[in-house]
Structures are given as C-alpha cells and as structure tokens.
Amino acid sequence: MAGKSGRNISAEPQNSLKNTVFSWEGILVLIFIAVNVFCAFLSPNYKITNILREMPKYLAEIFIMFPMVYVLVMGDIDISVGSIVCLSATLACMASNAGVPLLVVLPLCLAIATICGLINGLILTKFQELPAMIVTLATQIVFRGIAEIALGSGGSISLSSTKDFKILAGKIGPVPYVFILVAIIAVVFALILARTSFGRKLYAIGSNSETARYSGIHVQKIRLIIYTLTGFMAGVCAVFLTSVLYGANTTTGSGFEMDVIAMAVFGGVSTAGGKGKMIGAVISAFIITCLRIGLGLINVNSQIILIILGALLIIAVLLPNIAALINNMKKMAAKRAA
Amino acid sequence: MKKEALFKKMSGSQEIVLTLVLILLCVIIQIKSPSFLTMTSINDMLKNNAVIMLLALGMLCVLLVGGIDISVTSTSALSGMIVGLLLKYNIIENTLVLFLIAIGVGCICGVLIGVIISKGKVPPIIATMGFMYIYRGLAYVLSNNQWASAADLGNFKNFALGKFLGINNVILIAVISYIIFFVVMKWTAYGRKIYAVGSNSEAAAISGINAALIKLTVYTIMGGLCGLGGALAVSVYSSAQPNMMYGQEMNVIAACVIGGVSMNGGRGSVQGVLIGALMMAVINKALPLVGIDSIAQNTVQGAIIMVVIVLNVLMQRSTFKNSLKRREM
C-alpha cells in the first residue's frame, strides 16, 4: 500500500503471489481461463485451430484498443475511431480498385487515418474547453459522412482483386500474421505506458491535468500526439479489416468505439483517467474475443452476446465499488463497536 | 446607458444569439426554397423530430447533474418494441394503456441505470454504455428479430395522425413536456436542486440535498421520457423494429450541446435545449430543400454541429475576456 507520502510502506512485498492473484489482472486471467473452459464445454469445435482461424475477424478491433487505453488513461475519450476505420478502409478499397499497388495503398490508408486523428487532436488542443466526447462525436459524423459521399448511392464497395490484400491475411503455420502483430504491438504499447517517462506523463495528465501542466508536462502536445496515434492505429485496423472483409460499406467499423472502450474498461482502465494497465486491457480483449468465437460456434444470436458484454462491463466496474462499500461499512461498524 | 446594458445582456445571453442564428438560418432557407415555411412542412418537421426533442429534455437533466446517458435510444427501442409486440399479438389495444406501459418500461430501465450510477458509483458513460447493449439486445431477443408492421399496429398508429385543438398530437405532447420542464427547472425546488447537484455535488450534499436521490430520479425521468419517445416513434413511423432510432442518441446529445448545455454539469436551460433541438430539426429538414445531395447530408450536419460548438467556445472566451476587463477597472 502506498502511504500518503507516496513511499511504499506496506509490509507485504509489492509483487507477492497474493497481490498478483488478487489484483484485477489476476482475476481477469482466471476469467479468461473460465471463459475458455466454458466455451470448450459448450462446443466440441472450440479447438485451438478453429479459434485461430476465426480470430482475424475480431482481432482488427484490438489495434484501436491500444491507443484507446492511452486516451482513457489521459482522461479523454475518442468515439470517432469507428468512422476513421470506415473512411480509410473505403478510400483504400477505392485506390486498390483503381489499380494502385498494395505498397502504395497501405501508406495511403494509414496516412488518411492519421490525418483524421490529427484533425481530432488539433481541434481538441486549440479549443481546450470543448469536451472530447462532443468533438469526436461531430468528427464521427463527418468522417463517416465523407465515406458515404465517396461510396455514392450504392453504399458499399468490394475489392475487384482480393489478391493483394490476401497477402496480409496470411499465416505462419496456423498462426495468422495479425495475431503476431497484435502481440508485438501490445508489448510495445504496454512497455511505453508502464516503463517510459512518456507513459508516466499520461498517468499524470489523467490524474490531474492542471498539476501536470504546472509540473512542466506539455499536456496539449501529448494530447495531440495521442489523438494522432489513435488515428494511425485506426488505419492499421482498417487495413486488416479490409484483408478479411474484402471491401467496405457505410456501416464498416460502426460500434467499434464502444467495443474498444468496453474492452479497456473491463480490463480495469478508468474512464476518469489516471488508472489502468495495458496488460489488463489486453487480457480483457482476448476474453471478449474468445467469448464471441465460442458463442459464435454454437450459433448464439449476436445480440445475446451484446447483452452478455453489457452486463460484464457493468459488473466489472460495479463489483470493486461494492467491495469497497462493504469494507467501509465493516470499518465503520468496528469503529462504533470500539 | 440602460440601452447599452440591455444590449450587453442580450449579446451575452447564449439563447438569444442562438435564436438569431436559427432565424437567420430559416430566412436563408426560405429564400432558397419557398416551400420551407408552410404549415404542412413545419408540421412534418416537428412531428418527425418530436421524439428527439423529448429525449433532449431528459438529456438536459442528465447533463445538468454532470452525467451522460447514451442508452436513451436503446431504452426507447425496448419500450417501443414491447408496445409493438403487445399490439401484434393483440394482447392490449388501448392506446392510452400502451403509452402508460411504455412509460413504465422506460422508468424501470431508468431506475436500474440510476441505481447503478448513484449507488454503485459506476461512471455514467460506462453504465449507460452497458445498458445500451443490454436494452438493445433485449429488444432484439423479445422481438425474435421480427418487425411489428403497420398492419399489426391497428388503431395505435392513428395517434400520430390525430389532432387536438388543431395541433398534431405528437407535437402537442412535445410542447406540453417543454412547458412542464420549463416550469419545473426554473421555479421548483426540485429543479433548482438538479442545478445545485450539477454545479457542485459535494456542496449540494453538505447543504442538505440528497445528491444520490436527485441523480436517481433524473435517470428515472430520462427513462420515462425514453419510454414515451419509443411509443411515439412507433406511432409516427407506424412500425416497431428492434433497431429503431439506432445511433440517434448522438443527435440528442448534440441538440443539447448546441443549445449551450455544458457537459460538465450545472449549466444549461430548457429554452436553450428547445433552440438546439429546433436547429437540429431545421438542419435535417432544410438540407434536401436547399439542394444538398442526400448522400452529403451527414457530413454537412456534422460540420454544422462542429461549427456551432466552436462558435460557442469563442463566444464564451470573449465574454470571459470582457468580464476580466471590467474587473481591472
């Protein structure tokens, strides 16, 4: 336990087995195992090979979750990511159909998404009074709107040649490229958040952005960087989504922002800022992915999965609060008795 | 001197500036397309946007206490769907009873959200996001992915066509709601308590206001309005589908923010919300009239929302600067 002075005054070593198991991340690992056992029990088809085959469909979303954890840790929010995915995927498909080679399409797609993120960041840092929720809400409408204009009256586009994008959906043995990339990016993002001064600055901003500013952190510069990064990662998501869906339409990526925020929050990241670890978010992302694959295998209605997701999300935040409340009541009772 | 003070007061008040912008917008559209300001056109516009206007009222209260509710349209869809199903299987056909059921369902949904937020201390955005999934999912599960079409709705759909005192029923409900909320928010202890909790929850608690209870009731009211809105939407569009009003919660929030309601709580007014909601309605209605392609409508709408909120900030900055100058003297 950290004392008021900030020093560690706990008798228990910080990394003891007890602390590891009873931390939120430890509980998440247990839930992850439970979900896998549950799914294996439900369907005989729930095997490693099947899971890895189904995974690319769901993994693309996780790319956005990494920067979203940063955004949430800063105490901000970005609900325009789904629309950025839609816009960049649409334009990438159009470019690809126009005969542009893959090596040009990919940077183009990433550049468009990065510019979208940059626009978010610029508006938010120039007009700091504006809540992030509202700004990204407006850009959400605009970005998807531009995609709608580009798509025209049909409202959808499919790749005329899937050859190029199929390369991205390739595998090493049974393991798809996406999975490896997600793992690498997860490690990089987790290390930056936990081990670098840049990562610690994000926590400082999230805890109290005024104090952070007075202690010499360029709050607005960092916000701009993070929002641009979020745009970039939405572009990465768009690339891999296209490699699975072979096209785009006006609803591509809709709801991603909520899914991604749900994953992060379920992983213990606070929307109020300053709290949360990347590892928790990653585990929770895989819990949700496995649950979707498992329930998908036995043909459960996707809407029921949504209900389960919603309930999990609320319970995940509610349980620690109730535990704290009961603890508090016990303490009060003990005081009164004494 | 007095005249100058009046002018200052007027230009400083956000609602009046917004009204002027709205009038200007209407005039421009009217010049471009004379069919805009006719009785039928206005009637259509208000009728189609009445649900959003109603939800914006509830959202005002939620935003005032410093919360947010993104589950509103899911609650509407759930209660609307229940109404549709009751009609489809001929269980209840009385319009009034159906409305009461819808409001009741909405209130129950709202109470649940309110308890989780005020007693469970779950951040509003997380709690309502969870319930957004849950209620929408329930609507799908209950309906088994089926619609209730116009033929199933029987007499219920006539409610939206009916008139009372020459005003369409749906519009009348919206108008009455606005009047009630205006009075409650401005002149009753309950209304002022909502503002107090939003401005400073702790100070309100110390001065004897039960902040948790106020929050709980606010989310319940929001739920009730969602239920009413859901039933109205079923009547207006004469069909009930589980995906109805999907994504519209953002329009509701946008209407509030355009009307000058602060997302941090404690600031905002019923007349502001009315103007914000009307502006959204006018934009929706006018874009096709002035010849903007229907494909481009979302983009233009989003851009207008962005411009209005940026203007809001710039205006606040200038009033803040002015008041600073006055203090220096």
Image (spheres, rainbow, N blue to C red):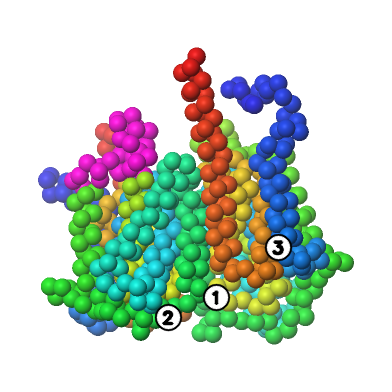
Specify the quadrant of the image occupied by residue B48: bottom left
Please tell me which residue lies in front, A278 or B315. A278
Residue A144 as seen in the image, left or right of residue A247: left
Residue A42's label in the rendered image is: 3
Badge 3 crowding class, 10 Å Cα cut-off, few under 14, some 14 to 19, many 20 or more, is some
Q: Label 1: which residue?
A: A250
| CA distance separating discs 1 and 3 | 35 Å
Check the image and name the residue furthest to the right.
A173
Q: Which region shows up in magenta? A: B186-215
Q: What residue appears at the point 41 percent right and 78 percent down from the top-left corner?
A: B148
Q: Residue A325's spot in the image, x, y percent?
A: 50, 33
Q: Vertical placement of A82 versus A98: above or below? A: above
Which secondary structure is most common in the magenta stretch?
Answer: helix
Is B205 included in the stretch rendered in magenta?
yes
Specify the quadrant of the image occupied by residue B305: bottom left
Q: Is residue A330 visible?
A: yes
Q: Label 2: which residue?
A: B294
Specify the quadrant of the image occupied by residue B234: bottom left
In front: mark 2 or mark 1?
1
Q: What residue appears at the point 20 percent right and 44 percent down from the top-left corner?
A: B188
Residue B36 as seen in the image, left or right of residue B311: left
Check the image and name the residue furthest to the top.
A338
Q: Is residue B55 visible?
A: no
